[in-house]
Amino acid sequence: MIKGVRGAVAASVICLGSWLAFGGTAACAATLEGQQFDNTMVLAGRTLRLNGLGLRGVLWVKAFVAGLYLPAASKDPNQILTMPGPKRLRLKVMLEAPSHELTKSFQHGASNESDQAQLVLAKRVETLSNLIDSLDKVHPGDIMDLDYLPDHGVQLRLNDKPVGQPVPGEDLYRVVLKIFVGDRPVDKRMREGLLRGGF
């Protein structure tokens, strides 16, 4: 609870400072572990709101902070998984690591789908896995986005530059989301943060 209160206070201070510095016109921001996220962003012509922030780490090792952006705030993972419109998972990297560590989590998540779904998804899971692997390594300060763009699919971006072409399918993006906010997430504490329901 104390940690949550500190996070809320930090976000409020940053928001107030931005508002004063820019004449009341700047977007507010939230922060976790020193990583700052705008409260809103525009993707595919829609304004998305920051739903929550979560830290991915083990013991004292901090890998990245994730921010989940949605068309509407929600604390319900099932609602998030089926919510229409564009979405963004933004990862702010804090530790040098091979990109295939994220690929393994993604492929593990896909293996939890039904046999029929796995058959339908197989080629697209491989394509997105290859795009992630093509990054080789991520470094502290890197920003990785996993976007869902309606009518296009899943777009991987690194430091605001697209990596390859979008991989089709809202069903594929649901697999990505489940890694973070599904019933069997890669990190339960990170899931709790992402399901905050807005700032």
Image (cartoon, rainbow, N blue to C red):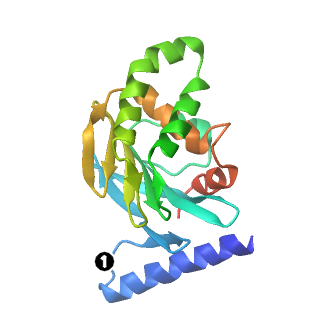
> Which residue is nearer to you in this view: 10 or 76?
10
Number of numbered discs overlaid on the protein picture: 1
- Give the quarter of the image for residue 111: top right
User: Which residue is found at the position 45% from the left and 71% from the top?
Assistant: 36
> Which residue is nearer to you in this view: 71 or 106?
106
Residue that lies at the very extreme toward the right in this rendered image = 1
Badge 1 is on which residue?
25
Q: x, y percentage for residue 21? A: 33, 88
Q: For the N terminus, give its image quadrant.
A: bottom right
Q: x, y percentage for residue 14? A: 46, 80
Q: Is residue 35 positioned above or below 150 on the image?
A: below
Q: Is residue 167 positioned above or below 63 on the image?
A: above
Q: x, y percentage for residue 123? A: 39, 20
Name the side, left or right, on which 124 lies relative to 51: left
Q: Residues within 10 Å of mark 1 (few under 14, many from 20)?
A: few
- Res. 160 visible in picture: yes
Name the side, left or right, on which 75 lies relative to 175: right
Q: Is residue 198 positioned above or below 147 on the image?
A: below
Amino acid at dot 1: Thr
- Res. 148 visible in picture: no
Name the side, left or right, on which 140 lies relative to 167: right
- Give the quarter of the image for residue 133: top left
Name the side, left or right, on which 37 lies relative to 195: left
User: Which residue is found at the position 37% from the left and 82% from the top?
Assistant: 19
Q: Is residue 28 positioned above or below 162 on the image?
A: below
Q: Secondary structure at mark 1?
A: loop
User: Which residue is found at the position 62% from the left and 38% from the top?
Assistant: 182
Q: x, y percentage for residue 161? A: 24, 52
